[in-house]
Image: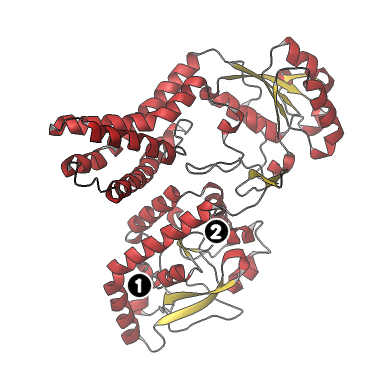
Amino acid sequence: MNQPLTDAAELPYGAAVQPPARGPFSRSLGDRSMFSGDLPHVALLRSLLNPTVILASLGFCLAVLGVPLDGHYLMLAVLAFFVSSQLFDRVDLFRLRPAELVVRAARDVLFAWPLTVAVIGFLIWATHYNEIYDRMVLTAWFLFTPIPLVFAHLLAHYALRAMSRTAEAQKRVVLIGASRLSLRLVETLQSDPLLGVEVLGFFDDRVAQRLPDLAPHSLKGPISQVPQFVRDNNVNLVFISLPMVAQPRILSLLDELRDTTASVYFIPDIFAFDLIQSRFDEIDGMPVVAVCETPYSGVNGLLKRWFDILATLAGLCVIWPLMLFAAIGVKLSSPGPIIFKQRRYGADGREILVYKFRSMTTTDNGPVVKQATKGDKRITPFGAFIRRTSIDELPQLFNVLFGSMSLVGPRPHAVAHNEQYRSLIKGYMLRHKVRPGITGWAQVNGYRGETETVDKMKGRVEHDLYYLRHWSLSLDLWIIVKTVLLIFRDKQAY
């Protein structure tokens, strides 16, 4: 691959330029497979890795336990192959940075495999085959399989990268329009050996005005020279990153590129804005681009809601004695109601009442609400205990059941705080594209409790928007696990 087109220190990426969201269980404009970016062997391995490991794990368990591989187990293997192919389809760990690989591999596999087990188990029970299979084999298979799955992904990750670094580039790329967005794309293409591309350079008529610090060797010429350059150099991919005001020039260029065999992609400059769940869609055949959308659209919304209801009911069955203890403690510790109801903003900015065990001697709910601070005299001794352990938040499980909240999502703020910060922090109200949560990505990353400065609130909002861009059920599950681990060691809770 050619030398980098820009020096790393010179990349002037604007803070507003965000890569389109992509998560292990969602597709978006940022999914590279949408432009057939995978090398053939990468695409094949991506499709077969998980089902193959799962079938090998089943065979291993049969061999260890001395159970013969008969027709029934062959049928189970075929069923597991097709079910896992679908449910693991969104698990893409090949392009992660090494620093996040192990955590993401464990998180995604430990989410997708139990879901696969649940589907297979239901089908076995529904067809009355549960008496045919050896329960020891099934139990060993279900418990053992995550281990080889995680190790297989780690091995495939490093092996593919090692192979791709030594392989010759299979696709040649040029970019039309030198912009911060196209520079970001170049960095991605050059840093990912699995794409197998060689970036030849930029074409632009006004590079001095658009990006004056572009490395001189990377500019190949004016836009008028693109068609001939593409034909002469066997260019496979052309990315157009011109402002939308240049539509006439773009249409003319597209017409000329029809005389080549290159694949052409348009990168609209809407990506310079803060995108939430960007994706392509269509209305009666007319293409539209979602710029800011809830991550819970379509089937995702049903999956999120079912997960909330089932997990909440299971949680209430386990912790109701703790909630009864908290209610008695609040009643005996100070005069006032057991449950404190506060007006907060929910999904789409609608007002909701959020339930909490009362932990203070006051119940502020007016136009001015003072945040709790360390050593706050309004907090009762018992209230300090339930706040520190987050027991005061447990009544919000009923908010989840009633549909005004979710288990995981941006934490709801008092209405008074919303009106204060929406004018101070750009994109603040975007966090209300979804139901608020009992816990969230910000809370497990150090932004729990008091936000006494605007900078701290900005940090919380940035984490909330990250959650909206990268939402998946596996991320929800990971946040719940981190929340449980955090409760007893969080020094910011008071």
- Relative to 211, does residue 489 appear above or below in the rendering? below
Mark 2 or 1: the one toward you: 1
Q: Nearer the viewer, residue 285 or 7?
A: 285
Q: What residue is drawn where x is 47% and y is 20%? A: 41
- Give the Cα separation between the discs numbered 2 and 1: 24 Å
100 left or right of 210 in image? left
In the image, 250: left or right of 475?
right
- The image shows residue 318, relative to residue 218, as above or below, that is below
Tell me, yes or no, whether the two marked residues, 2 and 1, touch with CB atoms within 8 Å: no
Which quadrant of the rendered structure holds the N terminus?
Answer: top right
- N-term mark: 2 or 1: 1
Quadrant for residue 361, please give it.
Answer: bottom left
Whole-percent x, y for residue 418 in the image:
61, 68
Q: Position of residue 343 (x, y in %)?
A: 55, 76
* Kind of residue at disc 1: Ile
Residue position for label 2: 456
Say which residue label 1 marks: 386
Question: Image check: 41 left or right of 368?
Answer: left
Q: Residue at x 28, y 67 (%)?
A: 318
Residue at (58%, 65%) from the top-left corner? 347
Horizontally, is 356 left or right of 57 in the view? right
Disc 2 is placed on an element classified as: helix
Residue 159 to residue 431: above or below: above
Asked if residue 447 shows in the view, the reply is: no
Front-most of 252 and 394? 252
Disc 1 packing (10 Å; few <14; some 14–19; many ≥20):
many
Location of the C terminus by quadrant is bottom left
Which label sits on residue 36? none
